Image: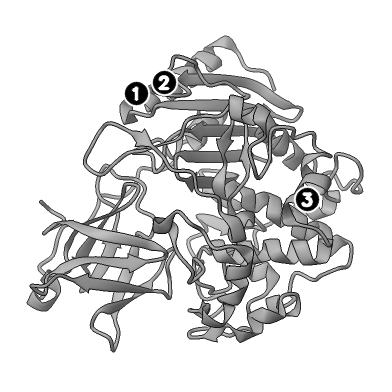
Amino acid sequence: MTLEQDTKSAVEALAQATRSRHGLPGLALGIVGEEGLLWSGGFGVVCLDGTDCPDENTVVRIASVTKTFTTTAILQLRDEGLLGLDDPLHQHIPEFGQAVERGGTVEEVTLRRLLTHRAGLVTESPVRGWGSLDFPSREEVLEALPRTEVVIPSDSAWKYSNLGFGLLGEVVSRLGRCSYDDYIRANILEPLDLESTSLDLTESMQQRAFCGYNLPAFQDRPETAPYAHLNGIAAAGQLHSTVADLARWVAFQFRGDGGARQGSQVLDGRTLNEMHRPQYVEPDWSAGQCLGWRATRVGNRVYHNHGGGIHGFSTQVWFDLASRTGAIVLMNMWPPPGGQNLAQDVLELLLGEAAPEPPEPPGFEAAPEELERFLGHYCAAPGIHVHIEFRDGQLCLTGPTGRPYSLHAPAQLEPTADADKWLVRGGRAAGERAAFEFDQNGEVAGYALGGFLFRRTRERASE
C-alpha cells in the first residue's frame, strides 16, 4: 500500500482539526502497512513550555495496549505446553483460591475469560485505587486476594478488569521463571526489535518523552499529569512505546500466515490467527472480544483495536486485517476531551468506510422524589465526568454531552439492601457497588467506584 499526496493531506487535515477542536497539546499519528510504518505525522507540541513537535520516535505511556503484549506472552506459554487457556487461574496462582465468590465462582475464573474480560472479576485490586497515585505492589495484590471479589457470573457480561491482566502477568512470571518485565523483553520486545518499548523509561527514552497532561474539571488549561507506576498490575498497562515501535507491533499482527514461531515471528502463525478470532460476540454483532484485542464492525469491515488511557496519555491502535492497514494515535492528555475515535476515522478515510450516525439521546424523565437526590453531574480526578440520570424507571450512569470519556458509563444502578450502595449493571464496573457518601446535611457528596472517587459538582445533570 502506498499513500498518495492527497491522502496524506487529508489525514493531516483530519489530525490537525481534531487537535485544534479538542484543545489537545500534541499528538503523534502513524499509518501502517504490511511492511511497517508507511507514514507518520506530529501535531502540536511535545511539551506546552516548548516548541518541539512530536514525531514517530516520541515516547508515551501506552497504558492498556500493554494487555496485547501480555496476551501474546500467555499464548507463547500455552504453545509451549505450560498452561491451557481454560485452566482456572487458581491452578497457577493458588492464592486466588481464597477469593470471595460474591456473584461468580473462583473455579470459573479461567485464563481465557481473563484475556477476554469475561471472568466476572472486579476491575481493580481492593488495595488503593487510581485516586491514590500509589498502585499496590505485587506482594500487596497477592496478599489482598482473600478480599478480592468475583462479582458477576463468568460469561454473563463483558466486564473489564485491570486486576485480571495484572494477575495474568503473575502467571507469566511464575511459568516463565523470571519477572514479567524480563519475560516480555526477551520473548517479545527484543525479537521484534522494539527498542523504544519498555516498562520503565530508559535514559534515551526520557529524552524523547511526551509531557503528559490532565485537564482539570471545568477548566481549559491543562496541568502536568502525575506519574504513577502500576507496580503489581504492570501487565495491565505499564508499557511505554512510540509510533515507530507500535507500527512494528501492528505489522506483526499481519503475519498470520501459518508459519512456525521463530526469530521475529514471536507467535506461531496459527496462534496469531487464533488471537484475532472473536471468542465472544455482542448480541447485535457490532463487536466481539478476541484474545487481547477488541473487534469492531464498521459497515462491511471489522477493525481490531485496543485503546489505552493513563495519567497524561491516551493511545489508540486500530488495524484492518483484510487490507493489512493500521492506524496509531498517541496523545499527551488523559482523559482527552475528544478525539478518541481518530484512529478509526483515519482508517475510514483510507478505506472508504463510515460508521452509522449515533442515535439521538433520550429525553429526561421525572424521577421519584427519593431518587432525585442522586441525580447530577459527578467528576473524578483527573477530569472524568459522569451523570447520574433517571432513565426508563431506574438510575443510570451516562456520559455527559461533550465529554466522550466517561469510564463506567453507560450502565444502570440497582438498589441493594444497603441504602448507600448501588449495584452496577453493565459496562466496566458490572457487578461492583457504587458506594455513596453524604455530607452532614444528608446530601449526596459523591461516590466511590472502581478505584475512583467521584465528587458531585452540580445538583442536576440538566443544569
* Residue at x-position 81% and y-position 55%: 271
* Three-letter code, disc 1: Ser
Residue beneath disc 1: 20
Q: How crowded is mark 1: few (under 14 residues within 10 Å), some or many (20 or more)?
A: few
Q: Is mark 2 on a helix, strand or loop?
A: helix
> Residue 175: percent from the left, percent from the top?
82, 66
Depth check, front residue: 164 or 428: 164
Figure disc tally: 3
Q: Distance between the residues labelled 1 and 3?
A: 40 Å
Q: Is residue 284 above or below residue 60?
A: below
Quick check: marks 1 and 2 in contact, CB under 8 Å?
Answer: yes
Residue 101, given in percent of the width and then of the height, sits at 53, 86
Residue 192 visible (yes or no) = yes
What residue did someone put label 2 on? 16
Question: Which amino acid type is marked by label 2?
Answer: Gln
The disc, 1 or 3, on the residue closer to the chain's N-terminal end is 1
> Considering depth in this image, is 263 or 299 the residue closer to the camera?
263
What residue sits right under mark 3 in the picture? 182
Q: Nearer the viewer, mark 1 or mark 3?
A: 3
Q: Residues within 10 Å of mark 3 (few under 14, many from 20)?
A: some
